[in-house]
Amino acid sequence: MATNAEAQGGVAVLERPVAVERDDSPSGREPIERDGGRGFASLVRTILGRDAVRVPLTVFLLSRAYIFLLGAIAMQIDKTLPPVAALGYYMPQMPGLAHYLLQPWRNWDGHWFALIAQMGYFERPTTAFFPLYPILLAGLSWFLDGRIELAGVLISNAALLGALFLLYQLVQLDFPRAVARRALLYLAIFPTAYYLGAVYSESLFLLVSVGALYAARRDQWWIAGALGFLAALTRSQGILLLLPLLILFVRQQGWRPTGWRANPISMALVPAGLMVYMAYLRRLYNDPLVMLSAQKGWDRYSANPLETLRAGVESVNGCAVRDWPNAGVDFCWAQRIIQNPGVGTVRDFDWRWALSESNVIELVATLFLVALAVVAARRLPLAYSAYLAAGIILPLWSPSAVHPLMSMHRFALTLFPVFIVLALLGARRTTHGAIVAVSAILLAFLTIQFASWLWVA
């Protein structure tokens, strides 16, 4: 297992007193006390009493209860935009309890994933969505008698719970337990955290990417490679795991092959995942890179990151939908919130619609991520800070003509170093309280936006 001392070799990490380090040493290794055969219930109580189980499970249950409640409230709102079709297919309304518990989480990309799970890659635009999540979705929905929305919500939430368990252990390899706890909390209530339980691939990617790096830190390189293979089949940024894995390999094994205890071929499994998908697309469409051209369906084009940032700044519009035909919006959202600050304005549907199309949320989120990446370069192990920087830069190479910084605040969910940095910055009680309050409020607002078919990410 990698130790704190190994992680420090030439890499800037936090210094902390020995007493604190001992008190906050990694949990999850406490022995399970045997109770003389008192039964299964006693064993369950013992397991749930372990910090490594109790903390992630508590964070998961409380955050999911909050988000599911927000989704149910959103479905009570009468005024929403009509659902957006995917390749001409529309989703029917769900009746009964499913209308409140499942329907809010299938919007936007969730519709695309459901179509692929049911019909395969039947049109070129579907190839923009990588295959592992739709495969799991199709498999579980078969067992659930075709209940695709239920299957997606179960997969995403199960993956999130697993990711929380692994992330809690991973963070404690370098930092005190208190930092790990805050990192989990900040991830679970991040303003776009509802995607982690929706019919989206974010939580699955988080599970396999965190698992890959945790296995690498424990010197289990074939497991790390296998999970990296799955990550590359889940999202396009899965290939970025090569960067932190290479850094960790060199830090652990050194530069000389004669001293390597692990086989570097294991890391080749990461690009192998992408190659498998490309081989499938070549067979299907005679074009292994068709998933790149499919991005044009979202008006994406190639640009360098600085041009993308400039376009993001220039696209901010204080009167975003005022001139849309038949939009019914005859005011500027920025002017109205200045003139009438308060809950009434924020609850107004037309105001929320205008804000969602203004690009201001994407710009703020991107600048926030860049600032955290700068802090990460000073306070996180090199493997993590490099992974964060690459994860920010990659989407900046392909902006959208509609929203130049499209989905940046959703992409942040899979970049776990973001939440370690926030956890380090939240050491003071006042800062911690501010992060929790702001995140919870924005999470409520954006969840209702998403469930109302207003653009979020």
Image: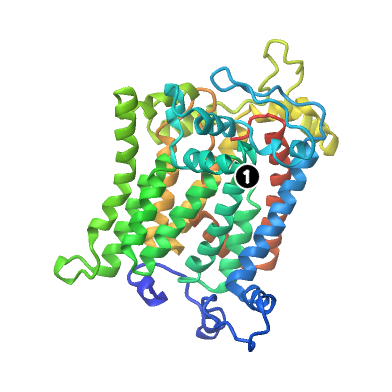
Q: Quadrant of residue 199?
A: top right
The structure residue drawn at horizontal position 56% and vertical position 23%, both measured from the top left corner, is: 86
Q: Does residue 304 lie above or below 368 as drawn?
A: above
Question: Can you give x and y, in whole percent of width and height, for residue 51 in the image?
Answer: 61, 74
On the picture, is 225 further left or further right than 427? left
Rendered view: 165 above or below 412: below
Residue type at mark 1? Val
Q: Residue at x 63, y 35 (%)?
A: 106
**Neighbour tally class for label 1: few under 14, some 14-19, many 20 plus, Cα within 10 Å:** many
Q: Residue at x 54, y 23 (%)?
A: 402
Q: Quadrant of residue 351?
A: top right
Quarter of the image with the C terminus in it: top right
**104 or 95, which is in the foreground?**
95
Q: Is residue 230 above or below residue 46?
A: above
Q: Please state the horizontal and vertical placement of residue 38, each as a whole percent of the image.
A: 68, 84
Mark 1 sits on what residue? Answer: 153
Residue farthest toward the left in the current orientation of the protein = 258
- Residue extending furthest bottom? 36
